[in-house]
Amino acid sequence: MAEQRKSNGLDTPLAARQRFWPRFSPNPDLFGSATEKFARFMGTPQFLLYMTVFCAFWLIWNSVAPINWRFDDATIGFTALTLMLSLQASYAAPLLLLAQNRQDDRDRVSLSEDRARAERNLYDTEYLTRELASLRLALRDVATRDYVRSELRNVLEELLETTDGEELHLRAKKKGGNKNSQPQTGMIETVKPQQSQHRKNN
């Protein structure tokens, strides 16, 4: 059985290779919060004041102090100070970008939450609108005060008419009971013109 040779070429996955230096994986939240704090401090008036005092002290010390005590020569244009300021600017730009990226992520999350909240409000508004429309449709079938009054008035008129009709019916019955010749039809006796003239002559 042939031994499998270890290959370190391109056909070997990167995860299978042993790293000489350990992988640097800091906590992104902790590192991001620290960089945001430093970036916010760099944008404050205190940082500008401290930088102004530091640069003024550097320039005055290397210009006025004895030559043996100076650590940056003014004749060559304060090279050390220039290098320090360049180094500070080169680190400040990535820190500011990192803080801006975190702020963009927070804005994106808050925007998505606002969008979801707006959608929920829209759904609630549509639901309330549908409920109000259904209530309006249901209230159309509900009897109002004026409708009930009109119906009661109609019923009262019908009762009065029925009472008057029953009285006339009873009167007709009484008249029909006095005359045995005529059948009791329950109708009001109609008087013919000849009979009325005969009654007047008598």
Image (cartoon, rainbow, N blue to C red):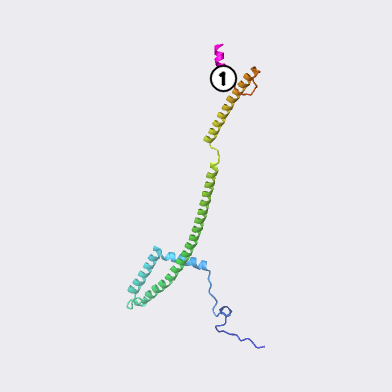
* In the displayed structure image, the side of residue 68 where residue 187 appears, left or right: right
Residue farthest toward the bottom in the current orientation of the protein: 2
Report the residue at 58% width, 79% height from top: 16
Q: Looking at the picture, tell me which residue is in the foreground, 191 or 122.
A: 191
Q: Looking at the picture, tell me which residue is in the foreground, 54 or 156.
A: 156
Q: Which residue is mark 1?
A: 192
Q: Looking at the picture, tell me which residue is in the foreground, 2 or 23.
A: 2
Give residue 90's quadrant in the image: bottom left
Place of residue 72 in the rendered image (x, y in percent of width and height, measured from the top left): 36, 76
User: Label 1 neighbourhood size at 10 Å, few (<14), some (14-19), many (20+)?
Assistant: few
Q: Amino acid at mark 1?
A: Lys
Place of residue 49 in the rendered image (x, y in percent of width and height, measured from the top left): 38, 65
Q: Tell me which secondary structure the magenta stretch mostly adopts.
A: helix
Give residue 75's quadrant in the image: bottom left
Part of the protein shown in magenta: 191-202
* In the displayed structure image, the side of residue 84 where residue 190 appears, left or right: right
Place of residue 112 in the rendered image (x, y in percent of width and height, measured from the top left): 50, 60
Report the residue at 51% width, 49% height from top: 129
For label 1, the SS is: loop
Report the residue at 62% width, 19% height from top: 175
